[in-house]
Image (tube, rainbow, N blue to C red):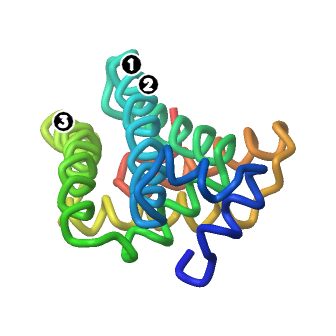
Amino acid sequence: FGSVSLRRIADMSGLQVGSLYNHIDGKQQLLFELIYEAEQNLFAALKQAVDETLTPVAQVGAYVEQYFLHASRNKELHLLAVREKRCLDDGDATRLKTLLLSHERLIHQVLESGVKAGVFTIPSYEFAIKAIWSLLDGMLGGVSTNPAEVSKCADQLKDCVTRLVGAGAAR
């Protein structure tokens, strides 16, 4: 993102640079808006998927599946959000952090409920959450956009994450 000019962004989107400046103050604001919207949409999809399931094992499966399916449908935007957060200025990074903490609390609550129910074994929530996110984001780069392949990969990831949290094979 750092090496792309606003003029290039305008050219790629079919706009005049002046028109682009009517909508945003600059490249930094555009980056923030793209990342924030991507993270908001992901969080909303994850929350709905988790809320629609009852057991911790099903919630982890729903979380993993929805994360991967949502990210793969919005692959370029998701990867931009994952890779370019470090380019945000301090004010935007702080605003984004509030949203990301909500995302982290959601998966933390799912994992904690599984531990309390005796179905998960998690020595470190922080490590488990980072491992889950790293696995999901890492696999995203290597999967095609073919829906059957994405779905198969999501199923394998559900099984892998379920095992990671100590619950055995995905149910």
Neighbourhood count class around disc 1 (C-alpha, 10 Å): few under 14, some 14–19, many 20 upward: some
Residue at mark 1 to residue at mark 3: CA–CA distance? 13 Å
Tag 2 and tag 1, C-beta contact below 8 Å: yes
Location of the N terminus (image quadrant) = bottom right
Q: Amino acid at mark 2?
A: Ala
Residue at mark 2 to residue at mark 1: CA–CA distance? 7 Å
Q: Residue at x 18, y 33 (%)?
A: 117
Q: Is residue 114 left or right of residue 7?
A: left
Camera sees residue 66:
yes
Camera sees residue 120:
no
Q: Amino acid at mark 3?
A: Ser
Q: Which residue is mark 3?
A: 113
Neighbourhood count class around disc 3 (C-alpha, 10 Å): few under 14, some 14–19, many 20 upward: some
**Quadrant in which residue 152 is drawn:** top right
Residue reaching furthest to the front? 18
Q: Which residue is mark 1?
A: 53
